[in-house]
Image (tube, helix red, strand yellow):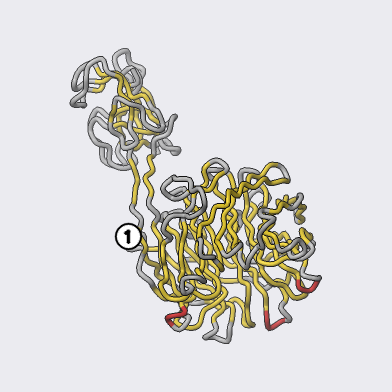
Amino acid sequence: MRTIGRDFGDTARKVYAVASGALGNGKTCVVNSNGTVSVVALDSASQALGTEGVFNAATTTEISSVYDSNAGRVVMAYKDEGNSSRGTAIVGTVDAANNTISFGSEVVFETGTTDFTSMTFDSNSNRVVIAYRDDADSDHGKAVVGTVSGTSISFGSIVTWRSAAVEFIATTFDSNSNKVVIVYKDNGDANKGKAFVGTVDPSDNSISFGSAEQFDSSIEYVSVDFDSSNNKVVVLYKDNDNSQYPTVIVGTVSNTSISFGTAVVIQSNSHGGDSSAVAYDSTAQKVGLFYNAQSEGKAAVGTVSGTSITVNVRSYAFESGGAIRITAVYDENSNKIVVAYRDPQDSNKGKIALPRISGTDMIDPDGTMPSSGGAGSPIIFETGAVTRHIGLAFDSANKKVTIAYTDEGNSEHGTFRVLQNSFSNTNLTSENYIGITPSAYPTGAGAEIQTKGAVNEEQSGLTAGQSYFVQTDGTLGTTAGDPSVFAGTAVSATKIIVKG
């Protein structure tokens, strides 16, 4: 690829680069990270929910989902009760144009009976890791590593990480240490809350573990996510030895071990309910904490600092009628947290709330800040009853969220939908504006871009002497947009001094 070059002639101020996408005549342009140039433009979409589809036409429970960013595929793992309750996985390809998913063939990863399935994607080894309880082997905790290739997945050998009964398994990937973290309730040791750190070996699809570390004396309903801005693991759970309060704690991974800070109670006047979810917001660099308490689906914002966390609750309720089987994932494209749950006060319908983090507050999707709870009108993704677990994954390539669940109204079949969140994003930043095109260029062609000091003569409707700013859609305006980028000064209706 040709890199940007500059002409240092006395009369011209311009650079040459390869066009990424067609460049129109007289268009404002940005330089991309790979050295190509593109016109300033908005990428946007309206809210849309794809039609319902089935990925397993049998009773399907214990569903978990993850997005494999290397393969560009979503993977769903579940207990296939139509096939002796075996642990099964399937690979899906999102059709962005139609908001649907096509699937490959099912692959069995555990011939015994699986429960409490949880998945994470190891972006260092480009492997999917599934942790689960093997009911056919005294409820022991086990894990298996999978490699996605096309529309299929192959697995390594099963590894036992706890040779005793376990429950409420949750997983995440620590991208700082390149380790997998499994948190769980240890039924074999007085229901203590514990964690294991795993290391994936991609050469043989194996995973090895360090020693278990305790973070609480008795727990239920544990969930976990990784805060990549602080390089910490955040664990949310119900503390049975402290009035069942919803509680959060921060973990630090070092080699094959994990250490924990001091636990923080989120609400001391409320039981933690029977569900929890953590979602890290990479834009706000904070974690959303979601749980069921006092017959409401509650949300709080956690700010990690060192090994501690501060929590702002504000009594924000994303569901006033209660929420169970809560799952959450951050949609980085729309800057919204997708919270899926079952509403027991509304015929167990499957619903989605879309709160956002602003500062240390949780706000509604429209940007308002409720005074006494509420998250706007939830999206109903299943009008019949949703049972057991809900699997969510964010497909970053297609900018979609996949929803996998058990549809009680359709013989408990494994069912999916694809959610497109509304967004309006620009490729313009405060630093990447480079100049204006003097003519049109097709994609892949070498393009001339007029830069600071050049006079572009391909404009219309300008006012001489007026300063103009680049707008987020690439047009010129007399007021600054967000970000504020100065385009230049007009010298006539058709001419502008670039970055004048």
- Residue 39 image-quadrant placement: top left
Give whichever of 430, 310 is nearer the camera. Answer: 310
Query: x and y percent of residue 56 in the render?
Result: 46, 78
Q: Label 1: few (<14), some or many (≥20) within 10 Å?
A: few
Query: x and y percent of residue 456 in the render?
Result: 25, 22
Give left or right: position of 466 versus 143: left
In the picture shown, does residue 154 fall above or below 441? below
Residue at image location 42% in from the left, 54% down from the top? 399
Give whichever of 130, 439 is nearer the camera. Answer: 130
- Residue 95 image-quadrant placement: bottom left
> Which residue type carries mark 1?
Ala
In the picture shown, does residue 154 fall above or below 34? below
- Residue 439 image-quadrant placement: top left
Quadrant (top left, top right, bottom left, bottom right) of the N terminus: top left
Q: Secondary structure at mark 1?
A: loop
Quadrant (top left, top right, bottom left, bottom right) of the C terminus: top left
Is residue 487 visible to the viewer in this orientation of the structure? Answer: yes
In the picture shown, does residue 271 fall above or below 258? below
Give left or right: position of 464 versus 112: left
The residue where tag 1 is placed is: 97
Is residue 148 visible to the viewer in this orientation of the structure? Answer: no
Query: x and y percent of residue 301 in the render?
Result: 59, 48
